[in-house]
Amino acid sequence: MVNIFEVNETNKMVEQENLDVRTITIGISLLDCIDSDLDKLNEKVYNKITTVAKDLAKVGAEIEADYCIPIVNKRISVTPIAMIGAAACKSPEDYVTLAKTMDRAAAKVGANLIGGYSALVSKGMTTGDEMLIRSIPMALTQTERVCSSVNLASTKTGINMDAVRLMGEILLKVAELSKDRDSVDCMKLVVFCNAPDDNPFMAGAFHGVTEADAIINVGVSGPGIVKTALESVRGESFEVLCETIKKTAFKVTRVGQLVAQEASKRLGIPFGIIDLSLAPTPAIGDSVADILCEIGLEYAGAPGTTAALAMLNDQVKKGGVMASSYVGGLSGAFIPVSEDQGMINSVEAGAITLEKLEAMTCVCSVGLDMIAIPGDTPATTISGMIADEMALGMVNQKTTAARLIPVIGKGVGDTVEFGGLFGYAPIMPVNKYSCADFINREGRIPAPIHSFKN
């Protein structure tokens, strides 16, 4: 039974400490929509999404009203479109029609975002994969809600360096096509190593081919709650610190579990996973960087940052797995620069650099996330930054990602405003030395020796 103390505690977390359920995401399989006729394929995709997700927005609003828990986004993820469109699409432009269909379907059901305009190319690219990747600039700049992801590497297969090189070029094309809006469409594109099949967060959500026909995945968030809890144990030992984080993560995850079960019951769709990620927002007090400062750092990025983040990430997972039997997705601490006021403050103070963010990647759930860089950064340099993130994920057997935003027409010292949950970001300096000869080699980097576990 839930007692009155727990009710009051949850109310306080919502009202004063920025507790929210960041997203209810319906994953939808489109495998049964595959057709060699492009018009029929688009019709099937639209009908499948609008049928399965027809009550998503309504149920989300009902749960918010019934439990007084904010649900920030209602989202959809679908089977990677590169494989869904392979039989029908003969050009990148054909794939763009599917992006527009996804966008119309998401708008029809009231979803904030739809993910799955994706390709999985960690070992090689099919013709369909390459066409989809080359269509990404058109797809993202001609739609409002569509998000795209490409898995470039895995621990089992290595790094597809041909795809890494291509993605550097594609990202600059997205930036150029949306330069009148500060290259904002780059926010809807992320590249992965070891991408999870059940991630509810955008831009990386897609519905894996091993998943059920439809599934409910929920992402919770509570950096402000963790920070407030740690304020009460200032100066205490690491043992007390860890126990406090763990207990707080348990409470936050239980809220997510409740919402997930209610959404599953009301929508008639099976519950998949809870993603435990601490996802910040630009709101004051809702920052992962502020947690690191509460632990004892002057700024995020100071010596000790990686150790503090490793501890935070581990304790969040330990608390979360006790609260739900089905934990998945990314499940860790996000460190996006533009979406976290504390991270922005650290960049502006000169306390954190791209190199330090790479180091932090080794111990948290994502990598170079929402990083604004100068618009004149060469494509090969962007590919080199991506390759570094892929290597960290491959060798450490974990998920890593890069969501970089080369802002055309702006440089170091400028600031770019994205708005809403995306916040704003200072343009960060990039290493000026070339890696072009490395990136322009053909082929792939082999999987590490410790990947051979059969």
Image: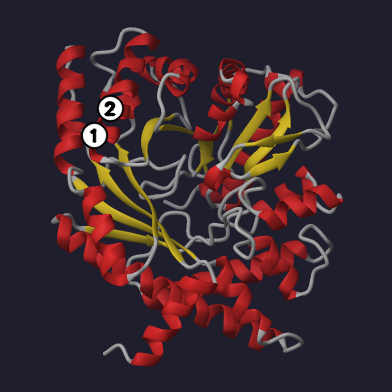
- Determine the secondary structure under disc 2: helix
Numbered label tally: 2
Compare residues 435 and 237 and report the one nearer the observer.
237
Q: Residue at x 16, y 42 (%)?
A: 52
Residue 51 lies, in percent from the top left, at 14, 39
- Determine the secondary structure under disc 1: helix
* Residue 291, above or below 448: below
- Density class for disc 2 (Cα within 10 Å; few <14, some 14-19, many ≥20) is some
- In space, the residues marked 2 and 1 are separated at their CA atoms by 6 Å
* Residue 264, above or below 438: below
Left or right, residue 94 beside residue 195: left
* Residue 316, above or below 415: below
Residue 293 lies, in percent from the top left, at 75, 69
- Density class for disc 1 (Cα within 10 Å; few <14, some 14-19, many ≥20) is some
Answer yes or no: is residue 158 visible.
no
Answer yes or no: is residue 219 visible.
yes
Rendering colour mode: secondary structure
Residue 48 lies, in percent from the top left, at 16, 34
Q: Residue at x 67, y 27 (%)?
A: 406
Q: Residue at x 24, y 60 (%)?
A: 62
Amino acid at the residue labelled 1: Lys
Q: Which residue is mark 1?
A: 108
Labels 2 and 1 touching (C-beta < 8 A): yes
Q: Which residue is mark 2?
A: 104
Left or right, residue 9 beside residue 266: right
Residue 87 lies, in percent from the top left, at 24, 16
* Residue 405, above or below 244: above
